[in-house]
């Protein structure tokens, strides 16, 4: 069983024992309802079991619920929830006739609309059509979209869309800030199709939402609805240009008609925004490259985006402006300078090696990435020294990445050195490296050290696999 089904099966047991519905499962989570639906029918494996029934049916409360279900006795909300998910179709169908009296069970009514049994499905659809309103759709929209992805689930999404289209525009307001991004995407698509939001409102939504898909949808449609001569353009551009999300900012920058304003975004922290700004500047007849060069040469008040921007549109000769920035006091500038040198394909191993001990993890990470293609030429002994426990964690990670890239005996030696490391992630990484190690052509057959290192990691292998590794290395097991 999957984790969702186990969760649902446990919730079913709690319901059978009389635990209130809102305590038995997270009623605000769409996944909890589909888990309950599957969990009520789930049978866990037990070789000693005499009767194969779901766990909840074997509890004392479950047997009482079962009697009430089969004899059509009175049912509370918890018992009816179990009935709506029951393994027998006739029980599910009978439960649907009572479900309308319990608003809290609306999600299970939605679930039953995609039931595999046609009679149950048809009853559920009739009940849902009779009882569901636009406000109810808003409550269960996350579940509606989840069920809509199933076979036979198109009915609920079509019904929900029809109700929301006919409702006042403000009905969708709670969906715009729903925690599930799928719901927000659906709501904004519907709002765009129906014209529920003005261009300014769409622009503010693009600036506010964290989902790139929502940002692009709202920003593109906001800009498409206004023209350069329209006084509303500024109301759309201002929120977009100030947005935190790069997709929204990029859309706003691309829509700029004044190149001098786009210049302010040439050093943006986002690559896509910088690219859009360069496009606008060039469309206006300008050249962004001198702008980048002038600021990198001056170094004062330098933003990291300016440094990498120079590399993105510059030439190899511009590396002379980036090398001095490796000593810049701002860690972001140092990191972007290393990244820029890599973009320009100008990497000097000797000059980048000292950055492996930089105090900023971002700088070390960029330096490591730049040095990886040259890992085989690095001094393995110096890198092994950086694996010492007293070194900063980011320095140790960088050293192991470079040692691991060297392959052969160096990789095995470094991996075995970290087998008992106090850092859990280092230890796990090293153990996996030892388990996956195979001798390469540069490891002389019969190398005694290989056997000693493999023996130190003996606990990671079965006896057969350990013998195979030694045999591959030309050693006797």
Image (spheres, helix red, strand yellow):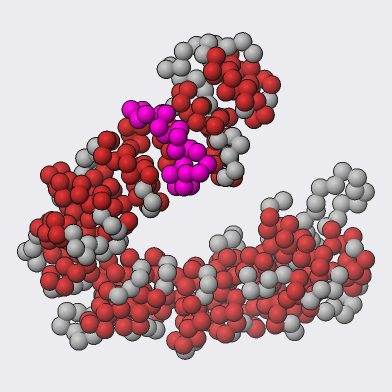
Residue 150: image quadrant is: bottom right
- Res 258 visible: yes
Q: Position of residue 437 (x, y in %)?
A: 53, 26
Q: Position of residue 80 (x, y in %)?
A: 79, 74
Q: Judge left or right: residue 47 versus residue 141.
A: right
Q: Judge left or right: residue 179 versus residue 79.
A: left
Q: Judge left or right: residue 243 versus residue 229.
A: right
Up the image or down, 231 lies above or below 111; here it is below
Is 329 colored magenta in this rendering? Answer: no
The residue nearer to you, when weighing 356 against 308, is: 356
Up the image or down, 286 lies above or below 429; here it is below
Residue at 33% from the left image edge and 65% from the top image edge = 246
Assign the C terminus to one quadrant of the image.
top right
Residue at 25% from the left image edge and 55% from the top image edge = 328
- The residue at the far front in this view is 390
The residue nearer to you, when weighing 213 against 112, is: 213
Q: Position of residue 247 (x, y in %)?
A: 33, 66
* Number of marks in picture: 0
Residue 268: image quadrant is: bottom left
Q: Judge left or right: residue 97 versus residue 440.
A: right
Q: Which residues are magenta?
A: 376-396
Residue at 91% from the left image edge and 52% from the top image edge = 51
Q: Position of residue 235 (x, y in %)?
A: 26, 84
């Amino acid at each position: 069983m999957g984790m969702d089904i186990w969760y649902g099966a446990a919730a079913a047991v709690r319901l059978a024992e009389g635990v209130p519905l809102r305590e038995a499962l997270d009623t605000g989570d769409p996944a909890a309802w589909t888990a309950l639906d599957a969990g009520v029918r789930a049978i866990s494996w037990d070789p000693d079991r005499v009767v194969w029934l779901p766990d909840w049916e074997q509890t004392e409360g479950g047997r009482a619920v079962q009697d009430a279900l089969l004899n059509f006795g009175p049912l509370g909300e918890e018992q009816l929830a179990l009935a709506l998910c029951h393994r027998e179709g006739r029980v599910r169908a009978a439960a649907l006739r009572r479900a309308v009296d319990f608003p809290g069970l609306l999600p299970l009514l939605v679930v039953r609309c995609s039931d595999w049994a046609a009679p149950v499905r048809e009853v559920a659809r009739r009940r849902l059509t009779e009882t569901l309103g636009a406000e109810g759709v808003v409550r269960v929209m996350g579940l509606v979209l989840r069920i809509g992805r199933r076979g036979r689930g198109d009915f609920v999404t079509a019904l929900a869309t029809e109700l929301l289209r006919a409702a006042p525009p403000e009905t969708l307001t709670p969906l715009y800030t729903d925690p599930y991004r799928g719901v927000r995407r659906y709501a904004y698509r519907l709002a765009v199709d129906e014209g529920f939001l003005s261009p300014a409102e769409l622009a503010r939504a693009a600036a506010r939402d964290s989902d790139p898909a929502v940002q692009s949808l709202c920003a593109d449609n906001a800009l498409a609805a206004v023209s350069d001569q329209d006084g509303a353009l500024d109301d759309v551009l201002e929120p977009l240009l100030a947005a935190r999300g790069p997709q929204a900012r990029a859309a706003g920058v691309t829509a700029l008609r004044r190149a001098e304003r786009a210049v302010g975004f040439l050093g943006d922290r986002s690559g896509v925004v910088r690219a859009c700004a360069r496009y606008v500047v060039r469309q206006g007849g300008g050249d962004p490259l001198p702008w980048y060069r002038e600021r990198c040469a001056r170094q004062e008040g330098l933003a990291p985006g300016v440094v990498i921007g120079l590399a993105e549109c510059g030439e190899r000769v511009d590396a002379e402006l980036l090398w001095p920035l490796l000593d810049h006091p701002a860690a972001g500038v140092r990191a972007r300078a290393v990244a820029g040198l890599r973009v320009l394909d100008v990497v000097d191993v000797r000059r980048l090696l000292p950055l492996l001990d930089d105090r900023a993890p971002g700088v070390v990470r960029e330096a490591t990435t730049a040095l990886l293609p040259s890992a085989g030429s690095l001094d393995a002994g110096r890198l092994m020294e950086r694996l010492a426990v007293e070194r900063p964690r980011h320095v140790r990670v960088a050293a192991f990445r470079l040692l691991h890239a060297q392959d052969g005996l160096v990789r095995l030696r470094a991996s075995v050195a970290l087998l008992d490391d106090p850092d859990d992630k280092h230890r796990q990484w090293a153990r996996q490296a030892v388990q996956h190690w195979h001798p390469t052509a540069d490891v002389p057959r019969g190398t005694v050290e290989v056997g000693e290192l493999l023996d130190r990691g003996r606990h990671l292998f079965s006896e057969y696999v350990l013998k195979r590794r030694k045999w591959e290395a030309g050693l006797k097991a």
